[in-house]
Image (spheres, helix red, strand yellow):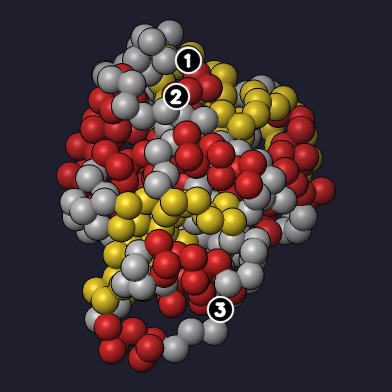
C-alpha cells in the first residue's frame, strides 16, 4: 500500500510517498480501506517535532480517517467487513489502509459521504469540548472564536449558537474568510490582521470583554486575547498555529478571576463518559441540519506536502481532506 511518511522533522518537504506492506489486523483490530483522511494542525506539529507528546521516527501522520472495514481480527464481534466507518487513531492515517480498534469505530450514517464524515470527529469533538467541558459556556455568554473560518472555528461558531451563546465574535485573517464566519452564524466579524483588533472585541462587548475565548494561533494573538477576557473569563488554548510561544504573567489573571486553560482532545477520548454523549449530540445536530460542515478542499494523498503548506499559510477555509 501507499503511505506518506516522514523520516525526520522539518517542513512539508520531509513528507514522502512510499510503498509499505499492508498491515494485518489481530485481536480487536480492524483493517480499514481508507476513503478520506482529515488534515489537521496536529499533523503539522507532529511533522515539525513540536507536538504535545513525542513523535517517534519514522512516522506516518494522520489521526482522522473514514473508510470501509476490509478485514477484522479474531476477537472482533461488533463490526463486519463492508461497514462504512469513521474513527480517530493515534497515527498512520496518511495511507491507503490503516488499523483501528473496533471499539473506536463510528458507523457512518447512510446519508453522509466519506468527506463529510471525516470532517466531523476531530474538529467537531474539539469544538464541543472546548466550549462546553473546558470553557463551561453558559447561555447568554459571549464567545470569541479565532480562526473562525478554519475546521474547528466553523463548527465552534455554530455550536456556540446552539449552546445558547448571547454573542459570537469571529476573527479571521481576511475579509473573505469572515464572510464564511457570518454564514456560520457569527454576530460580530473582526479581521485580526488589522492592528488593535482587540479594541474592536472590547467595543463589541460594551467594554466588558468576552466570557469564553478560543485561541489556537499563539504569539501576539494570545497576548491580545488575554486582554479581551471579561471578569471570570475563560481562555482555552488548543494550538499554536503560528509556531510562536508567548511570554505570559499568570499573576495578571488574579485581579479579575480569569482562567487560561489547555485543551488536548486525546484526554477527552480516554473518558468514554465524556466522549460518547458528545459524539451522539454532534451527529444529531448534523442529521437535523443544524450543523454544517465546510470542506475546504480534497486532494490526492501524494499532495500531502502541498496540503500542509496550504494549511499553515492560514489562507484556507474549512476542512482539508486527503484522498488515497
Circle 2 crowding by C-alpha within 10 Å: few under 14, some 14–19, many from 20: many
Seen at 48% across and 40% down, the residue is 182
The numbered mark at residue 113 is: 1
Q: Locate the C terminus by quadrant.
A: top right
Query: What residue is shown with label 3?
Result: 246
Circle 3 crowding by C-alpha within 10 Å: few under 14, some 14–19, many from 20: few
Image position of 213 with respect to 286: above or below:
below
Of 267 and 145, the residue lying toward us: 145
| Element type at mark 3 | loop
Q: Are marks 1 and 3 in contact (CB under 8 Å)?
A: no
Between the C-alphas of marks 2 and 3, the distance is: 35 Å
Query: What residue is shown with label 2?
Result: 117
Q: Locate the N terminus by quadrant.
A: top right
Q: Is tag 2's residue or tag 3's residue first in the polypeptide sequence? A: 2
Q: Is residue 9 visible?
A: yes
Image position of 256 with respect to 56: above or below:
below
> Where on the picture, by quarter, is residue 193?
bottom right
| Element type at mark 2 | helix
The numbered mark at residue 314 is: none
Image position of 24 with respect to 320: above or below:
above
Amino acid at each position: 500500500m501507499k503511505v506518506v511518511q516522514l523520516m525526520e522533522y522539518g517542513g512539508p518537504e520531509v513528507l514522502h510517498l512510499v510503498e509499505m506492506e499492508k498491515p494485518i489486523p489481530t485481536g480487536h483490530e480492524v483493517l480499514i480501506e481508507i476513503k478520506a483522511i482529515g488534515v489537521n494542525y496536529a499533523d503539522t506539529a507532529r511533522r515539525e517535532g513540536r507536538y504535545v507528546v513525542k513523535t517517534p521516527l519514522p512516522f506516518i501522520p494522520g489521526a482522522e480517517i473514514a473508510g470501509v472495514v476490509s478485514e477484522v481480527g479474531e476477537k472482533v464481534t461488533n463490526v463486519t467487513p463492508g461497514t462504512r466507518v469513521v474513527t480517530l487513531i493515534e497515527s498512520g492515517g496518511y495511507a491507503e489502509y490503516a488499523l483501528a480498534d473496533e471499539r473506536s469505530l463510528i458507523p457512518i450514517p447512510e446519508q453522509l459521504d466519506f468527506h463529510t464524515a471525516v470532517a466531523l470527529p476531530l474538529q467537531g469533538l474539539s469544538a464541543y469540548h472546548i466550549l462546553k467541558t473546558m470553557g463551561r459556556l453558559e447561555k447568554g455568554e459571549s464567545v470569541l472564536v479565532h480562526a473562525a473560518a478554519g475546521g474547528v472555528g466553523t463548527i465552534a461558531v455554530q455550536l456556540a449558537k446552539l449552546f445558547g451563546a448571547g454573542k459570537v465574535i469571529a476573527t479571521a485573517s481576511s475579509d473573505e474568510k469572515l464572510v464564511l464566519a457570518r454564514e456560520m452564524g457569527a454576530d460580530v466579524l473582526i479581521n485580526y490582521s488589522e492592528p488593535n483588533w482587540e479594541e474592536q472585541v472590547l467595543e463589541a462587548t460594551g467594554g466588558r470583554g468576552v466570557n469564553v475565548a478560543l485561541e489556537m494561533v499563539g504569539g501576539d494573538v494570545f497576548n491580545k486575547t488575554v486582554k479581551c477576557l471579561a471578569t471570570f473569563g475563560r481562555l482555552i488554548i488548543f494550538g499554536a498555529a503560528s509556531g510562536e510561544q508567548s511570554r505570559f504573567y499568570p499573576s495578571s489573571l488574579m485581579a479579575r478571576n480569569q482562567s487560561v486553560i489547555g485543551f488536548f482532545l486525546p484526554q477527552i477520548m480516554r473518558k468514554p463518559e465524556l466522549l460518547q454523549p458528545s459524539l451522539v449530540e454532534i451527529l444529531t445536530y448534523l442529521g437535523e441540519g443544524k450543523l454544517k460542515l465546510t470542506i475546504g478542499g480534497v486532494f490526492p494523498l501524494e499532495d500531502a506536502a502541498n496540503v500542509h503548506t496550504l494549511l499553515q499559510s492560514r489562507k484556507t477555509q474549512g476542512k482539508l481532506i486527503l484522498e488515497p
